[in-house]
Image (cartoon, grey):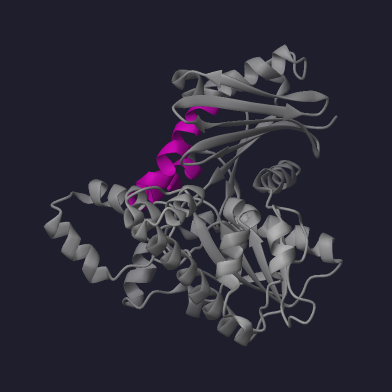
Amino acid sequence: MEKKYLIVNTGSASKKYSFYSGSEKIYSAHFEMEGNDFIVIETGKNIEKKKTKITKKEYINAIFFILSSLIAKGIISSKEDIDLSGIRVVASGEYFLANHFVDKEYLRMINIAKQKSPLHLSSVMEEIKRLKKFLGKDKPIVGVSDSAFHATIPQQSRLYAIPIKDSRRFGIYRFGYHGISVQSVILRTEKILGHLPEKIIVCHLGGGASVTAIKNGKSVDTSMGFTPLEGLVMATRVGNIDASTVLFLLEKLKKNYKQLSDYFNKECGLLGISGKSSDIRELLVHEKAGDEDSTLALKIYTDRIKQYIGRMAVVLGGVDLLIFAGTVGERSAIIRERICDNLKFLGIEIDSELNSKNDGTEEKINKADSKVEILVVKTDEVEEMAKETYNLAKI
């Protein structure tokens, strides 16, 4: 009999759940805020898409809503029908360069990792508690690592220039994130093209953003580091910043560790520069209305992406394929256009007409004579998590 399992992907502003029987997805639910309201959008096999307004309490305890909905729709008769679950885990540490069952050792390692990056693990730990509470303590949970795909990054790209004894003693390395998404994109690309080019750069652009260099299907460098805070300018995350600036702000802003962590993760990036919004769509509207800081925020955003594309091209020794993925990468033609502007020296030439017509279709958007192919690919983290959960459960 096929195992039935629930996949959980909690983000900073949304929660996604999918229910599988074997390798088949039966049901999905996406919880998020729409304006000032909490909503859930449900879809699935033989299920009409439905959007429902919910309370904040229902959002927090989304797993209870899911169980009730699965039973009401006749997908399961009780929670006992769910054999296991898988949850996306974003955590610093060599231990998390692989997927594991969530046991006492795993929870111990998460608590250690939480001391390094509390912001990204608090919601995961709370969700694990809810899964255990609602599904039962004995039901297996798989922690699907967001860094596992980047385990192939070589040491010269993984280390910071601090004393190596401290790197080894404290486990300070560049682990990389968005690995589940990038792995999904690479597998999807091979199906679309019928082959996998040797040198690929993946731009995952959403609320969080990263650029990854892929050689022969393996990750060899990526923009995110010890935590997902490093690298590109993101919606509310600062990205790269001089370490001395961190020390200076610590003194001038008179913030403690948690407050400064929140500052860099929630108050910076596009939101901090523009002073208006963290949403690309809204910033484009403000830009059109003549707001200079919104224009500046967008300029810095695209310039940093360009810089990392250049870096990854050096790491790879050239580029065969540039991929745009993630919400912004898939849907924003104007951002793709701006990123590719003046990259002809790398062989990257976007076709403005093909690009402007593309709102997420998995197609090439490069000029016919471009030396580098440019492809829009839809990432499916949940599907990739399902595969990893299913495969680990079969061991």
User: Which residue in the rendered view is the most extreme toward the front?
Assistant: 289
**In the image, what residue occupies the spot 64% across and 15% down?**
68
Q: Which residues are magenta?
A: 105-131
**In the image, what residue occupies the spot 37% across and 67% down?**
240
User: Residue 57 location in percent, x, y?
Assistant: 45, 19
Type of secondary structure dominating the magenta stretch: helix
User: Residue 285 location in percent, x, y?
Assistant: 47, 50
Instruction: Judge left or right: residue 241 versus residue 15.
Output: left
Instruction: Judge left or right: residue 128 versus residue 248.
Output: right
Q: Is residue 250 above or below residue 387?
A: below
Q: Nearer the viewer, residue 393 or 282?
A: 282
**In the image, what residue occupies the spot 52% across and 36% down?**
14
Could you tell me if residue 392 is visible in this image? yes
Instruction: Judge left or right: residue 347 versus residue 25.
Output: left
| Picture mark count | 0
**In the image, what residue occupies the spot 60% across and 55% down?**
332
Q: For the N terminus, which image quadrant?
A: top right
User: Residue 33 location in percent, x, y?
Assistant: 49, 31
Q: Nearer the viewer, residue 42 or 352?
A: 352
Instruction: Assess whether residue 121 is covered by the magenta stretch.
Output: yes
Could you tell me if residue 395 is visible in this image? no
Q: Nearer the viewer, residue 121 or 100?
A: 121
User: Residue 185 location in percent, x, y?
Assistant: 70, 58
